[in-house]
Image (cartoon, helix red, strand yellow):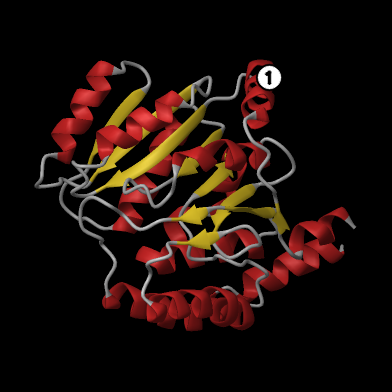
Amino acid sequence: MIADLHRTGTTVKPLQGRSHFSRLSTFLREQSVRIFIVIPTYNEVENLHLLVDAILELAIPDLGILIVDDDSPDGTGRLADELASQHLGVVRVLHRQGDKGFRKSLVAGLSEAMNLGAEIILQMDADFSHPPQYIASLLDCVQGEADVAIGSRYVPGGSTAADWHPLRRALSRFANQVYVRSFLRMPICDATGGFRAYKRSVLTGLGMAEIRSNGYSFQVESIYRCFCLGYRIEEVPIHFPDRIRGTSKMNWQIALEAAWRVLLLRWRYRSLRQKSQTDVSA
């Protein structure tokens, strides 16, 4: 029965204020867990120092921040180095050159966080579309029964920016709540969301090198792989604002890739899902 619960449905975790911090602090002291927040960056010089300050203001114990910069021409990498010098041992920087892209940047960051000894790894964007005030709620989930926690726009209590264009709002909701859910038969409300926390064991067993998608489709493929492998996934309601500073990396090419990749995923992972279902029933 427990295995079946891990395979079906997701749990919505209500926000419970700052009590998260005290429980999380106690858990970390008792378990000696180290958390890393992985932040991929490309041309985020206007946001990065503000985001790092906001995260550090949360005063989460035993926390590390890993900035993964894709050779940003606007000086984000230099700023990251300055922040690392100001916060020795807390902020670290991974500079990437050559073959760029969201997937490779994020995978490199997640892998480096594990190399640094992280037991809980959280990924988030640098543009404040993933507000830092929800970090404790995500960590609270994975310190408990959840293997993966997603900051979700589309569970009860979640929301998006009020000034989103109606077409953008409709497409995003359709993609997550109709297209992905129905085609992949996966009970996740926000599969494209990139504000996530993982237990180390998930990333160790996930086989990140086998994930081929980029952008939003990387988020869909990685969470679908988690689902097929039987990991317990919980969704935490968040408000998803638009960026205020800098330029969005989102474009129609990324959106179209996400759409057609979904068509391939169910076929590609059919044997993995069948094996997982067999293991659960056994």
Is 149 on the left-hand or right-hand side of 210?
right
Residue 171 x/y as whole percent: 44, 80
Q: Quadrant of residue 176?
A: bottom right
- Asked if one can make out residue 18 in the rendered structure from this viewpoint, the answer is yes
Three-letter amino acid code of the residue under disc 1? Thr
Q: x and y percent of residue 34 in the render? A: 53, 25
Q: Nearer the viewer, residue 101 or 196?
A: 196
Left or right of 15 on screen, residue 73:
left
Identify the residue at image location x=51%, y=30%: 35
Q: Position of residue 118 (x, y in %)?
A: 51, 30
- Which residue occupies 18% across, 41% down? 45
Task: Identify residue for label 1.
Answer: 26
Task: Locate the N terminus by quadrant.
Answer: bottom right
**Quarter where residue 143 is shown:** top right
Kindly identify the residue that appears in the image at 15 percent across and 45 percent down.
Answer: 71
Name the element at disc 1: helix
